[in-house]
């Protein structure tokens, strides 16, 4: 488990960043793996990368290789 602060996770993966409150909601609803500790939201980067699916078998295969 590699926890990243939500702000760092957003910077790493988004060209058009979602609001931190949006990411907090995703984590609280279980849509994105992570934890809210106090006032800080963290995303489990390893679990998130392992769960990403595009619907394109070629792209999903490439992502699986990156994550292994």
Image (spheres, grey):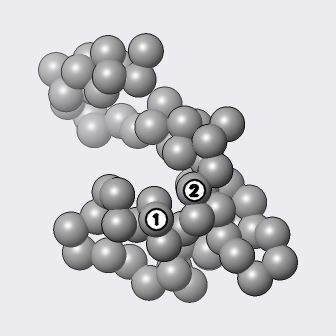
Which quarter shows the C terminus? top left
Q: Is residue 15 visible?
A: yes
Give percent across and percent down for residue 51. Answer: 49, 35
The residue wearing badge 1 is 8
| Residue at x 81%, y 69% (from the top left corner) | 37
**Which quadrant: the N terminus?**
top right
Q: CA distance from mark 2 to mark 1?
A: 6 Å
Mark 2 — residue?
4
Give residue 38's position: percent from left, percent from top.
Answer: 83, 78
Helix, strand, or loop for circle 1?
Answer: helix
Residue 35 position by quadrant: bottom right
Q: Quadrant of residue 60?
A: top left
Circle number at residue 55: none
Q: Are marks 2 and 1 in contact (CB under 8 Å)?
A: yes
For mark 1, does the 10 Å Cα neighbourhood hold few (<14), some (14 to 19), or many (20 or more) residues? few
Q: Residue at x 40, y 66 (%)?
A: 10
- Label tally: 2
Q: Give neighbour class at mark 2: few <14, some 14-19, many 20+ (Cα, 10 Å).
A: some
Residue 67 image point, x, y percent: 41, 23
- Out of 55 and 40, give the one closest to the viewer: 40
Element type at marker 2? strand
């Amino acid at each position: 488990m590699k926890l990243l602060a939500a702000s760092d996770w957003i910077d790493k993966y988004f060209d058009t960043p979602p609001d931190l409150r949006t990411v907090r909601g995703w984590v609280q609803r279980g849509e994105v793996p992570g934890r809210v500790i106090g006032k800080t939201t963290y995303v489990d980067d390893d679990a998130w990368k392992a769960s990403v699916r595009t619907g394109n078998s070629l792209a999903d295969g490439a992502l699986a290789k990156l994550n292994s």
